[in-house]
Amino acid sequence: MLHCWLVIFKDRRIAAGSAMSLLNDLINLNLSDTTEKIIAEYIWIGGSGMDLRSKARTLAGAVTDPSKLPKWNYDGSSTGQAPGEDSEVILYPQAIFKDPFRKGNNILVMCDAYTPAGDPIPTNKRFNAAKIFSHPDVVAEEPWYGIEQEYTLLQKDSKWPLGWPVGGFPGPQGPYYCGVGADKSFGRDIVDSHYKACLYAGVNISGINGEVMPGQWEFQVGPSVGISAGDQIWIARYILERITEIAGVVLSFDPKPIPGDWNGAGAHTNYSTKSMRNDGGIDVIKNAIEKLGLRHKEHIAAYGEGNERRLTGRHETADINTFSWGVANRGASIRVGRDTEKEGKGYFEDRRPASNMDPYVVTSMIAETTIIWKP
């Protein structure tokens, strides 16, 4: 009898393995073998300002220009973006990326959202950012951005950081930043998958590293010019959400996921203009920093929810109520690098944005304050 049960168990295991193998084969079907049609995944930002939504449609053939893509619609009452009695919201395709999940000629499409009358809905932050980046003064300065996106991986059932004992704590911070080893690095397979998927998609991802708090990681995107900085961060976030979905891990952009003596999560934004990158640019940088200081409160209000839990003056942050800057000072609001000081030109880093900031808002606001705004 025991032998019979073992045979049945083995047969079921083989059948399950065969089913999974078939499922993987179907997922990885190369559509170009049989059709010119492609799948376009339309992606947009939901009502919370951080929740990403997407749905797919079939197109007749390969498309590389977003202006050639059809507009689409969705039920805004189900995303917190429209009332039930007038729920239609229109998606305008804005940027195209290769789809690392379906591969082939299939694409990811970053969209923003409008009413049927053509007005941007309130959660469409891209619209205003695009206006700022199309301002002649901003275009002439060609603003570059490099965004350091930090995030935390959480266990699905407990919502506790990956690698942490459930309900307990690991050893104190110190060995985890850029750490190597099973007791220091948690989730590297997810991180490396995301890195390669972003490169495949066409995101200008420039690096990754483990962060100070265990279970926390960072990826960097840039240099990106103007509005593309926001498009690329959102697509990189979408790809990461999809990979963590597959891995059964929860992705958090909370700026202070664990209270206490643990680092928070930010989105440090490195920035330069053509004038800053040219000879004598250090004076332009200092002038820009002075302007940012004058508008500190407005920037803080737009730099992410819950940031007051992170910007405490501890854990490599400046106090949220005080504006400061310094050379190589990671405890300042704005950090100027040693190379920039030495060469007299370059870039600076705004360390205030939280990990859950909207990159359309942050990048365009920095450009508006430093280029357009006249105190």
Image (tube, grey):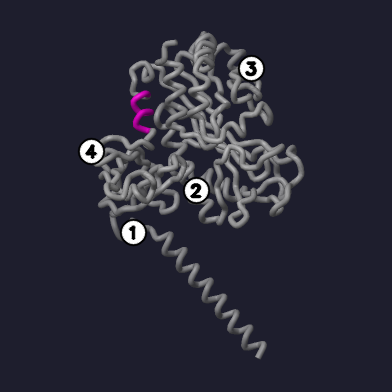
Kind of residue at badge 4:
Ala
Q: Earlier in the sequence, mark 1 or mark 4?
A: 1
Is residue 43 visible to us here? yes
Task: Look at discs 3 and 1 and give the one toward the viewer.
Answer: 3
Label 3 neighbour load within 10 Å: few <14, some 14-19, many 20+ = some
Does the magenta segment cover residue 131?
Answer: yes
Dot label at residue 117: 4
Label 4 neighbour load within 10 Å: few <14, some 14-19, many 20+ = few
Which residue is identified by label 2?
A: 241
Q: Residue at x 55, y 24 (%)?
A: 350
Kind of residue at badge 3:
Val
Which residue is identified by label 1?
A: 33
Q: Residue at x 42, y 16 (%)?
A: 371
Distance, label 4 to label 3, CA atoms, is: 49 Å
Q: Earlier in the sequence, mark 3 or mark 1?
A: 1
Which residue is identified by label 3?
A: 327
Q: Earlier in the sequence, mark 4 or mark 3?
A: 4
Assign a secondary structure to mark 2.
Answer: helix
Image quadrant containing the N terminus: bottom right
Q: Compared to 330, does 344 lie above or below?
A: above
First to last magenta residue range: 126-132
Position of residue 162 measured from the top left corner of the image (x, y, whole percent)? 64, 50
Distance, label 1 to label 2, CA atoms, is: 29 Å
Distance, label 3 to label 1, CA atoms, is: 56 Å
Kind of residue at badge 2:
Glu
Position of residue 301 measured from the top left corner of the image (x, y, whole percent)? 50, 27
Distance, label 4 to label 2, CA atoms, is: 32 Å
